[in-house]
Amino acid sequence: MKFKKLISIFKKKGGFELVKQYKKSGVLLFALLEGMILGKSRTSLEILRLAIENKTQQKLSHRYKSEILELKNKYTKFENATPNTMGTSNIIWFCWLQGVQNAPEIVQLCYRKLKNASNGHQIVTITSDNFQDYVKIPEYILIKWHNKQISNTHFSDILRAGLLAKHGGIWVDATVLVTTSKLPLYFDDNLFFYQSLKPGKDGKALFISSWVLCSHQNNPIILMTRDLLYSYWKKNNFLQDYFLFHQFFCIACKVFPKTYSNVLPIDNALPHKLLLSLFEPYNKKKFDLYLSESPIHKLSYKFKEESISKNNTMYIKLLKELRKK
């Protein structure tokens, strides 16, 4: 592999920021040794990424072993509770901390489509001005957020865990597009999230997606995830793993297997197909197929200028369709 191509792949995977993260996580030496063994191809780097995620989860499980056991004992009563005894909620949580009016166009369009599909659910828009009306976040976390030790992205992870633990409801990320007139019925389940399913799940330590997260109040997996996040930020002033929320959530799924086993298995691959083809030339068959395959689509607002300036792409077609509805 040419050196320039290797550098390009290194940058796409996170570059030196990724090296810093591995150092903070205590897996840098492991990453270097595994990298030397596996080689530098794209496939090897993907295998390395999965191995590091697994190693990171092992370290977190060991580091928080006593707290995990304590939380298991504390919240097992909710795992054994019947769904009818756990509080339900008709709230949809949508978060853009700066206010939707200040969000990128794609976020505003997603918000409008979500409102059209809410079907009796109450949409609560969470901002930096009102989140404390709905959930109490520990002061030490607020201080670190204000000091920018916790980014808005990761603060939203803390918010979703806190809001769902207290109120229940449906958390929908700001870049999730709903393309049907009603939300799926399983969004009102005791717990639901999109996930990697077999055979793709094999070998993955992080098998969950958090961009749509639905639960009733006091769900034990949500409660444990929230409390582990609180504990982490009480002891740390930096984020050691970008997917810390996912790490703790997956640990909680293993601790409460009964609750996890009741989650309707729907793969997270289909909602990503539209995103992955946005800057391909527009193809009506593909476009219609992607919209028909899933009522939910995970998008993004972080695109390169050279990509969004292309003509006659799937992205241009999507914007045209969303703007006129």
Image (tube, rainbow, N blue to C red):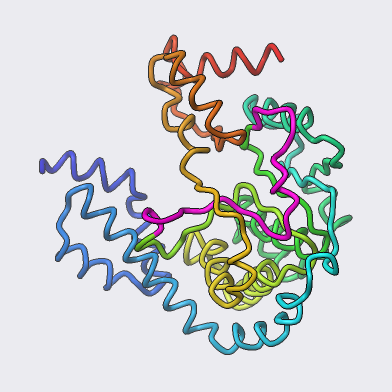
Task: Identify the residue at image location x=53%, y=61%.
Answer: 246
Q: Position of residue 228 (x, y in %)?
A: 63, 74
Q: Percent x, y for residue 127?
A: 78, 45
Residue 205 position, x and y percent, is: 42, 65
Vertical position of residue 154 compared to residue 310: above or below = below
| Residue at 60% from the left image edge and 55% from the top image edge | 264
Residue 197 is inside the magenta segment: yes
Q: In this view, does 256 lie to the left or right of 98?
A: left
- The residue sitting at 36% across, 50% down in the picture is 14
Instruction: Tell me the quarter of the picture where residue 82 sits.
Output: bottom right
Q: Residue at x 71, y 49 (%)?
A: 171
Question: What residue span does the magenta drawing correspond to?
Answer: 178-201
Q: Quadrant of residue 202?
A: bottom left
Q: In which quarter of the image is the C terminus?
A: top right
Q: Which of 29 and 296 is in front in this view?
A: 296
Q: In this view, does 280 lie above or below 31?
A: above
- Residue 271 rendering spot, x and y as whole percentages: 52, 38
- On the rendered structure, is 282 left or right of 41? right
* Residue 46 magenta-highlighted: no
Q: Quadrant of the N terminus?
A: top left
Question: In the picture, residue 190 is in which quadrant?
Answer: bottom right
Toward the viewer: 23 or 275? Answer: 275
Which one is in front, 119 or 53? 119
User: How many marks do you count on the picture?
Assistant: 0
